[in-house]
Image: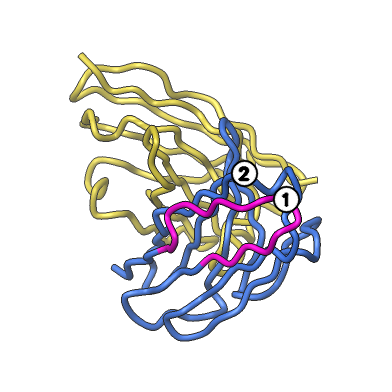
């Protein structure tokens, strides 16, 4: 059974930093594309970033230059370093396993709140 | 970015009725990279349909997807009480992912 267990998140002030982590199990982590998707309160999901099995990355325009996605295949772990956070980054963040173009499995979500 | 527009915004139906949800893209999308999700309050989205018409593991056969080009449809043949939820379409192309704004299926 695929499991994605998230940690990190919380409350920070504008301009602050947070790091999210996602531990994977139940599948061969290193061959899959992984991603972060967020959902602001009352809004639909919004793609944030993707990391491919060959470590190539892509980012939404709204976070490029501020967020960094990474993976540690030896630890079956995915991370998202979030710097220069803004109020509009407030959302529940999900890690997700991407298969072809869709997100097959999702983590439980973690709340990030950016507020002074 | 490819914009996905879902309609209607809200669908009010009774259990046992048929639900038809639409998703229209601002440009043609790759049908192999198109899917639908169900989301209930406080839960992560759940993949229902991938590659336009294939049901994800464990999804009942009352859910079906169709479409091509820029027009896609999710059909729920007979609504069960657990199907009342939010539904989102999603596409991947040019290294980017976009979601629709959602359709709420509510009990009439």
Q: CA distance from mark 1 to mark 2?
A: 7 Å
Element class at badge 2: strand
Front-most of B50 and B62?
A: B62
Q: Quadrant of residue A114?
A: top left
Where's residue A52, x and y in %? 50, 60
In the rendered image, the vertical position of residue A66 relative to residue A51, given as above or below? above
Q: Colour of chain A?
A: yellow
In the rendered image, the vertical position of residue B52 relative to residue A80, given as above or below? below
Q: Quadrant of the N terminus of chain B?
A: bottom left
Q: Colour of chain B?
A: blue
Front-most of A109 and A2?
A: A109
Where's residue A116, x and y in %? 20, 13
Where is mark 1, residue-wise?
B15
Query: With B25 as the anchor, is A62 left or right in this view?
Result: left
Which chain does the numbered disc 1 sit on? B
- Tag shown at residue B67: none
Q: Are dots 1 and 2 in contact, CB under 8 Å?
A: yes
Task: Give the residues drawn in magenta, as a range.
Answer: B6-21
Q: Residue at x 37, y 36 (%)?
A: A40
In the rendered image, the vertical position of residue A38 relative to residue A28, given as above or below? above
Where is mark 2, residue-wise?
B107
Mark 2 Cα within 10 Å, few/some/many (few <14, many 20+)? some
Which chain does the numbered disc 2 sit on? B
């Amino acid at each position: 059974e695929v499991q994605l267990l998230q940690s990190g998140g919380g409350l920070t002030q504008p301009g602050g930093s947070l790091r999210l982590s996602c531990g994977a199990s139940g599948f061969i982590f290193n061959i899959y594309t992984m991603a972060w998707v967020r959902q602001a309160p009352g809004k639909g999901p919004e793609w944030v970033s993707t990391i491919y099995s060959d470590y190539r990355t892509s980012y939404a325009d709204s976070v490029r230059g501020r967020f960094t996605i990474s993976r540690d295949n030896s630890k079956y772990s995915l991370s998202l370093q979030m710097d220069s956070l803004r109020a509009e980054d407030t959302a529940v963040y999900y890690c997700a396993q991407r298969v072809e173009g869709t997100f097959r499995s999702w983590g439980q979500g973690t709340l990030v709140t950016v507020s002074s | 970015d490819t914009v996905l527009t879902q309609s209607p915004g809200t669908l009010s139906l009774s259990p046992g009725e048929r639900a038809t949800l639409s998703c229209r893209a601002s440009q043609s999308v790759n049908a192999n990279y198109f899917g639908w999700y169900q989301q209930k309050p406080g839960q992560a989205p759940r993949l229902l349909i991938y590659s336009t018409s294939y049901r994800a593991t464990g999804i009942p056969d009352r859910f079906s997807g169709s479409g091509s080009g820029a027009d896609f449809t999710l059909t729920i043949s007979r609504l069960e009480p657990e199907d009342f939820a939010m539904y989102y379409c999603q596409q991947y192309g040019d290294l980017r992912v976009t979601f629709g704004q959602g359709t709420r299926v509510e009990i009439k």
